[in-house]
Amino acid sequence: MQGARQAWWFAAGRLLATVAVGLICGWAFGNAWAGLAAVLAGQLAWQFANLFRLDWWVRHRSYADPPEFSGIWGEVITQVVRLHRRKRYHKRRFMNLMRQIQRSTAALPDGVVILNAQREIAWFNRTAGHLLNLRGSADYGLRIDNLLRQPQFARYLDEARYENAIILQPDAGNDCYLSLQIVPYGEGQQLLLVRDVSRQMRLENMRKDFVANASHELRSPLSVIAGYLETLAHDPALHEDLRPPVDEMRRQAARMTSIIQDLLALSKLEESDEVAEGGYIDVPAMLAMLRKDVLARPVHPREVRIRIESSEMLRGNESEILSAFSNLVDNAAKYTPAEGAIDLRWWVDDEGAHLSVTDTGIGIPQEHIPRLTERFYRVDEGRSRATGGSGLGLAIVKHVLQRHGATLHIESRQGVGSTFTCHFPPERVIDADVQSRAAG
C-alpha cells in the first residue's frame, strides 16, 4: 500500500515537472501553449507505448517475462504478477481437488452420473458407465432420458419426487435390476445414483414366489380342516368338554384362512407394477357401506362419523380401493375402544383427492410408524393376536396406493389416536357431474 502511494506521488510529480518544462520551453521559443501541447503529446505517446507493452505481456504472460517499468506502471505489473500467481495456485489446488473427487467417485461401488439443469450428462464414473452402458465422452452432453428410454424412469423425472429410488430392468432379456435415485444439488444440477440390486431382487422374487406358492398349497387343506371342524362343532354327539377346544380350533382356522387370503391378495398386487386404471368409484357410497359394516359388529366404537366435503369421484380399480379402505377402517375399529369414535373424511383440493381415517384408539409409538407397511410387522405381538390381525393389511394398502399413484401418510400419538391419510394425485379425481353426463 505504501509503495502504491509513493508510485502515484512520483507519477504526479513527473507530470507536473513535464508541464513546467513544456511551459518554459514554449515561453523560450515564444509560444508557451505550443510547448505545453508538445510535451503532453510526448507524455501521452509514452503512456500508450507502456500500455501496448503491458497488453502484449498480459496476452503472452505464460512464456514472456514481465516488462521492466518504474513508477505506477511498475506497480501495475507487480499487482498483475501477484494476481496471476494467486490464480495459478488456486487453479492447481482446484484441479488437484477435482482429481481427488474423480478418483474417489471412480472407486465407489455405486454409479454416479452428474446431470446439468437440462438433464444432460456432464460426467459419470466407471461404475455408472458399466451399469448404464455409457460410452465415454461420446455420451457427454446427451440427455439421460434419451439413453434410458423407460416410461417408469420418465415419470420419475417428471414427477420430481426424489425421496425414494426406483427399480428398473434396463434389458428385459437380462436378469439385471438397477436402483436409480436423483439427488438435486446446486442450481438445477442433479446427481443420478445407480446401484446394482439384481441379487436383492432375485431373493425378493424367490421370497414372493415361495409365499404365493405356499399360500396356494395351504388353502385347500385348510379349507378341508375348517370344513371338518365346522361339521364337528355342530355334531350333537360331541362331548361338552370338547366343544371349547373345537371352537378355538375353528377360530384359529378362520384366522389362518384370513392370513392366506391376504397373502394371495398381496401376491396378486405384487405381480404387476403397472398403473391401475379401472372405472369410476363413488367414494362417499363406499364409506357409507364401510360404516355400516363397522356398526354391525358385535363390538364396535360408539361413533363412526363420515365427513363428505367433495362430491368428486375417484378413478381406479374399485375392488383394490375397497380392499385398501376396508383395511384402514378395520384397523381403526380393532384398536378403538367401545367408548371411542372413528372419523372418515373425504375431500378434494388442488393437490388431489384425500381420504383420512382417524380413530381415538391406543395410538402408535413414533419409532414404529416408518415400518408399519412392512409385511407381518406388528407393534405389539400379543395385542395383534388378540385382535386377530394378520400384519398384512397396511402392506396391502401401500401396494394398492402405489398402483394408483397415491401415498399413505400416518400420524399417531400414544393414548390419543391415529390418522391414516391416503393422498391421490389430481389426475385420479373425476367430477361427479361430468361422469353422470358421460353415463347418460
Image: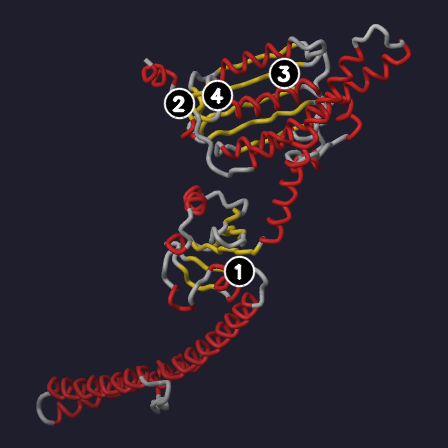
Q: In this orientation, which residue lies closer to the viewer: 413 or 270?
A: 270
| Image-based side of 12 in relation to 366, left or right | left
Which of marks 1 and 4 precedes in the sequence? 1
Quarter holding the N terminus is: bottom left
Which of marks 3 and 4 precedes in the sequence? 3
Mark 1 vs mark 2, CA separation in Å: 42 Å
Which of marks 2 and 3 precedes in the sequence? 3
Residue 256, how many percent across, how many down? 73, 26
Which of marks 2 and 1 precedes in the sequence? 1
Mark 3 vs mark 2, CA separation in Å: 26 Å
Q: Amino acid at mark 4?
A: Trp
Residue 99, how many percent across, how many down? 51, 72
Q: Which residue in the rendered view is the most extreme toward the right?
A: 241
244 over 398 or under it: above or below: above
Q: According to the image, label 2 marks what residue?
A: 430
- Give the secondary structure at mark 3: strand
| Image-based side of 296 in relation to 163, left or right | right
Mark 1 vs mark 3, CA separation in Å: 48 Å
- Give the secondary structure at mark 1: strand
Q: Are marks 4 and 3 in contact (CB under 8 Å)?
A: no
Mark 4 vs mark 1, CA separation in Å: 42 Å
Mark 1 Cα within 10 Å, few/some/many (few <14, many 20+)? many
163 over 438 or under it: above or below: below
9 over 28 or under it: above or below: above
- Give the secondary structure at mark 2: strand
Residue 342: mark: 3
Q: Amino acid at mark 2?
A: Ile
Q: Amino acid at mark 3?
A: Ile
Residue 111: mark: 1
Q: According to the image, label 4 marks what residue?
A: 347
Residue 210, how many percent across, how many down? 66, 40
